[in-house]
Amino acid sequence: MSDHQALVEALLMKSILGQDLVDTKFHLYSGRSPLSRKTSQLQALSANDVVLTARSEFFAELLSRTGPSDATFVDFDDGSVFEDGMALDDYGYASDSDLEDEDDDEASQTQVSDKITAPPIVRKTSESDENDDDSFVMAGGRGKIDSTICDPIPGLPPQAVTPTTFSPIQPVVNCRNILVRDTAFRTWKALLLYLYTNKLVFSPLKSQGKPRADVEGPNPSTLWPCSPKSMYRLGCKVRLDSVRDQAFCAIRDSLNAENILQELSSSFTSKYPAILQMQVQVLVQHITAVPVIQNIPSLIRKIVDSQLPHGADIMIDLYQNFLLQHHPQALARANAPAEDSDSSQSDDESGYVARPQQSAQPLSWHELPKSPPPPSPSS
């Protein structure tokens, strides 16, 4: 029996015996207000500690309180203090595409009514425009109510699902409540599903021009897609290499000649050297494509104008890829470790002992050799 199957059977046994399956509730923001530049729509996800600690060393440390302190996780008893959201600068990832952009008109009406009985209408976007973390791209014509907000965890009976409202949180007795400050509800939901089922589904990048609704499928309760960028970031945070690597592959497979320059210019790319190196390799593969030829001057201008914090790294990696393809031997010689002084003085097969060369010292004017005098007329 696999470890995963054993966990599932343990949960089923607890359910049959009527034991509580929820040990921890994670509270996360699912929305973003471009008008107020704050997160919004705090929602909760339930989890079983046995599953989390068995699947992840990070969660074992977090839930046992044995790991280093992390300010992005906040234990609380009364969640009303967090209902108003938090500044995007404090959230730490303003361009997180798994945060759904609220309609400003709907948000203003919500503030006036002061009573919320249903989720506000939001516009779904896929990967948000990360050329500038202060800008938000609204995907026109894609607005709809999020049908995944109240989706049950697969396998749980429908009556176990509590309809989502945005009234003050009522903490569950004997259940630990944790606010996650820097991750979207959608991303964390996909992570929990992975820990339970080993399944990960990713949304397309916004730069691909595909709406997220195309990948949600007819039964969203068993398919919770998230941004591969957001999941890569979370996979690095919780130290799950398998999650990080799957997200990495999803990002790479989403790149093409049409969007590689946009993705290479993003602030997300600037934070992860492995992503940057991979994207430069993709750029080299498409270097003769018409969209790249047409738009690469704009990228270079941004680098020259210091608009990209990782501009120098782009140019360095691009140059190294050029050397690797066209002058690999020269690159190998340049990267070869320099011999230390001891090895440079060792005897070779002919018995010759190499001596360190003395550095040439510049000659002063009086040390220059004098020209011989001209011959005398009498000679």
Image (spheres, helix red, strand yellow):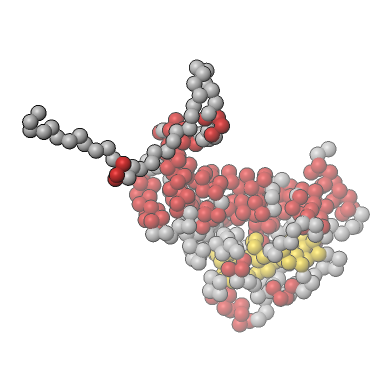
Q: Is residue 225 left or right of residue 70?
A: left
Which residue occupies the extreme left position in the image? 378
Residue 41 image point, x, y percent:
65, 69
Quick one: quadrant of the C terminus? Answer: top left
Q: Nearer the viewer, residue 348 or 357?
A: 357
Residue occupying the far top of the picture:
350
Horizontal and vertical percent position of residue 234 = 65, 54
Quadrant housing residue 66: bottom right
Q: Is residue 98 above or below residue 228?
A: below
Q: Residue at x 67, y 44 (%)?
A: 242
Could one spot residue 376 in this view of the protein?
yes
- Residue 373 placement (x, y as % from top left): 17, 36
Q: Quadrant of the N terminus?
A: top right
Whether residue 370 sits left or right of residue 326 in the image: it is left
In the rendered view, tell whether residue 188 sits above or below residue 6.
below
At 53% from the left and 28% from the top, the residue drawn is 345
Observer able to see residue 63: no
